[in-house]
């Protein structure tokens, strides 16, 4: 006799498992029925997220700006999946009050992922196309190792690269009407020690 068919856990069962994870881990449901856990990010990732969040302060209504609600690491439900984008934004015209449910079911208008070696593949190959298919209008991919920001716009359910910004540049990156200075995003390497005579 064969083994009984494996029961696929429900979204609610997986969410309960995620909620029981120790504080040093976070969890997402990238594929239906499966949890992906990861440890908290390292300094280059944290710095890029924090500085991007601050750079968008003039757009974030909660910080005194206008037009957007910007959230750090919100848990967003995409049907039977749960993503925790590093940053996400909802236009105030579509969402008059900040999203206040757990997990958030109103899909963001913008998501931002800061890439790290352990997450870059999933961020690019699972989350980016799924965001676009689901109707998220804009996605940023920030790569601290390359000092690069890529801006994707959703076109007919597909992510299309529409802008890039590198190194120390300052420019307006859609969908925000703000000049963003990138130099602070990157942790500079330590200067080389002078050689002894």
Image (cartoon, helix red, strand yellow):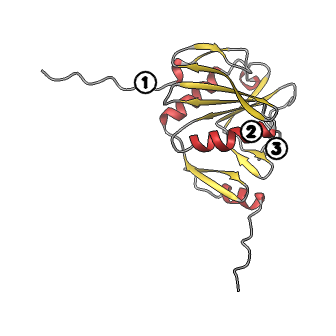
| Residue 153 horizontal side relative to residue 140, left or right | right
**Which of the two discs, 2 and 1, sits closer to the camera?**
2
| Residue 194, horizontal then vertical, whole percent | 22, 21
| Residue 119, horizontal then vertical, whole percent | 57, 43
Residue lying furthest bottom in this view?
1
Depth order, front residue of 168/106: 168
| Residue 62 horizontal side relative to residue 120, left or right | right
Depth order, front residue of 188/116: 116
Mark 3 and mark 2 in contact (Cβ < 8 Å)?
no
> Is tag 3's residue or tag 1's residue first in the polypeptide sequence?
3
Real-space CA distance between mark 2 and mark 3, rounded to the nearest whole angstrom: 13 Å
Q: Secondary structure at mark 3?
A: loop
Instruction: Please tell me which residue is depicted at 58% across the width and 55% down the height of the picture.
Output: 22
Read off the residue under disc 2: 131
| Residue 124, horizontal then vertical, whole percent | 63, 39
> Is tag 2's residue or tag 1's residue first in the polypeptide sequence?
2
Real-space CA distance between mark 3 and mark 1, rounded to the nearest whole angstrom: 38 Å
Q: Secondary structure at mark 1?
A: loop
Give the mark count: 3
Read off the residue under disc 3: 105
Instruction: Please tell me which residue is depicted at 53% across the width and 34% down the height of the picture.
Output: 45
Return the mark for residue 188: 1
| Residue 196 horizontal side relative to residue 169, left or right | left
* Location of the N terminus (image quadrant): bottom right
Return the mark for residue 134: none
Depth order, front residue of 1/71: 1
Find residue 195 and report its image quarter: top left
Q: Secondary structure at mark 2?
A: helix
């Amino acid at each position: 006799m064969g083994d009984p068919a494996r029961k696929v856990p429900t979204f609610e069962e997986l969410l309960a498992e995620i909620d029981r994870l120790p504080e040093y881990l976070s969890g997402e449901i990238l594929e239906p029925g499966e949890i992906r856990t990861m440890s908290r990010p390292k300094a280059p990732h944290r710095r890029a997220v924090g500085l991007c969040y601050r750079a968008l302060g003039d757009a974030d209504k909660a910080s005194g700006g206008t037009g957007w609600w910007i959230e750090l690491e919100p848990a967003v439900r995409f049907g039977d999946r749960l993503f925790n984008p590093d940053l996400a934004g909802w236009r105030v015209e579509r969402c008059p009050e900040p999203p206040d449910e757990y997990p958030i079911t109103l899909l963001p208008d913008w998501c931002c992922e800061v890439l790290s070696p352990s997450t870059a593949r999933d961020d690019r190959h699972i989350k980016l196309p799924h965001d676009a298919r689901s109707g998220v209008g804009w996605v940023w991919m920030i790569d601290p190792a390359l000092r690069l920001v890529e801006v994707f716009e959703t076109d007919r359910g597909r992510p299309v690269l529409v802008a890039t910004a590198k190194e120390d540049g300052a420019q307006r990156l859609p969908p925000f009407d703000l000049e963003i200075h990138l130099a602070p995003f990157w942790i500079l390497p330590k200067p080389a020690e002078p050689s002894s005579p």
